[in-house]
């Protein structure tokens, strides 16, 4: 069995939590930066890249705060990917925390993937 390691990345983003959430908590928002197209039927989201599809199930959602997905093709019950908004109580700075899993040798590549994706998100929202 392949063991995946959990990692988290924090990205400061100049946006309100409500506006930011629309870009990762809705299919239309995810379609603007994460995948070519995203559709949902209830808690199942279908992500489309270059004609290929991947499905993920929403495991947990708190509007304007976080959403956690589980790839249906991933047989490991412990893995997921999550977008979570954190607001500093004092400065009111907004950060997006991305949690994901990767095999030990692929962590750096996965982190680069998320850095590129979040750069795209920032360009999309003008942050």
Image (tube, rainbow, N blue to C red):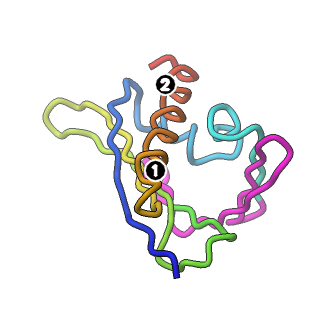
Q: Nearer the viewer, residue 25 or 4?
A: 4
Span colored in magenta: 41-67
Cα distance between the residues tagged 2 and 1:
14 Å
Residue 76 higher or lower than 127, as above or below? below
| Residue found farthest to the top | 126
Residue 27 higher or lower than 7, as above or below? above
Label annotation for residue 24: none
- Residue at 82 percent of width and 51 percent of height: 52
Residue 109 higher or lower than 78, as above or below? above
Where residue 79 sits: x, y (%)? Answer: 49, 70
Q: Quadrant of residue 59?
A: bottom right
Which residue, given by chain and number where applicable, does mark 1 sit on? 83
- Residue at 44 percent of width and 20 percent of height: 127
Where residue 43 sits: x, y (%)? Answer: 68, 66
Q: How many marks are shown on the rendered structure?
A: 2
Q: Is residue 79 left or right of residue 85?
A: right
Q: Is residue 60 magenta?
A: yes
């Amino acid at each position: 069995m392949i063991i995946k390691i959990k990692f988290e990345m924090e990205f400061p983003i100049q946006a309100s939590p409500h506006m930011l959430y629309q870009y990762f908590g809705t299919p239309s928002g995810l379609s603007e930066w994460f995948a070519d197209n995203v559709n949902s039927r209830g808690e199942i989201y279908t992500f489309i890249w270059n004609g290929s599809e991947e499905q993920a199930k929403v495991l947990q959602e708190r509007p304007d705060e976080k959403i956690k997905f589980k790839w249906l093709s991933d047989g490991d019950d412990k893995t997921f990917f999550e977008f979570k908004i954190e607001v500093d109580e004092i400065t009111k700075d907004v950060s997006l925390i991305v949690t994901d899993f990767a095999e030990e040798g692929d962590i750096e590549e996965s982190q680069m993937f998320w850095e590129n994706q979040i750069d795209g998100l920032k360009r999309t929202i003008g942050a």
